Image: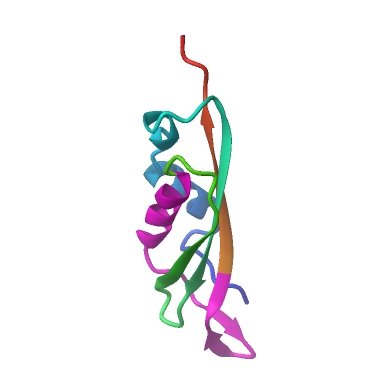
Amino acid sequence: QSAQFPGGEEAWIAFIEKNIDDNVPARLHAPPGSYTAVVTFAVEKDGTVSQVKILENPGYGTAAELQRVIKASPKWIPAAQNGKVVLYRQKQSATFTVFVSY
């Protein structure tokens, strides 16, 4: 059984959307376009999030912002295998879009 954010996948997406500052790349003068950052993290046996590491960093503060939000996550429901609580690893991506300003 995989680790789960309290409330499930929809609640996890809502948590990220609520807490992420999607204007970071624009404030750091990123040219118009899309920037997808990817991090990996662990859900410990007690449900805490740890080992948040950047896998793909397109720059302009995007990966650091995603990393910040993941680190701020509340406890998860831990993963279980054969009835035992286990460490669980997960990837998460976020795409930031910078629009042309006139």
Give the colour scheme shown.
rainbow
User: Could you say where residue 53 lies in the image, as x and y percent from the top left?
Assistant: 48, 64
Left or right, 26 with reference to 13 = left
Residue 56 picture quarter:
bottom right
Viewer-proximal residue among 42 and 25: 25
Furthest residue toward top:
102
Residue drawn at x 40%, y 32% as measured from the top left: 23
- Asked if 49 appears above or below 82 in the picture, the reply is above
Viewer-proximal residue among 61 and 79: 61
Residue 38 picture quarter:
bottom right
Q: Which residues are magenta?
A: 62-89
- Asked if 40 appears above or below 93 in the picture, the reply is below
User: Could you say where residue 19 lies in the image, as x and y percent from the top left?
Assistant: 38, 46
Residue drawn at x 37%, y 54% as measured from the top left: 68
Q: Is residue 88 magenta?
A: yes
User: Could you say where residue 5 lies in the image, as x and y percent from the top left?
Assistant: 49, 63
Viewer-proximal residue among 22 and 100: 100
User: Could you say where residue 91 lies in the image, as x and y percent from the top left?
Assistant: 58, 62
- Asked if 37 appears above or below 46 in the picture, the reply is above
Q: Which quadrant would the N terminus be assigned to in this image? A: bottom right
Viewer-proximal residue among 62 and 11: 62
Label total for image? 0
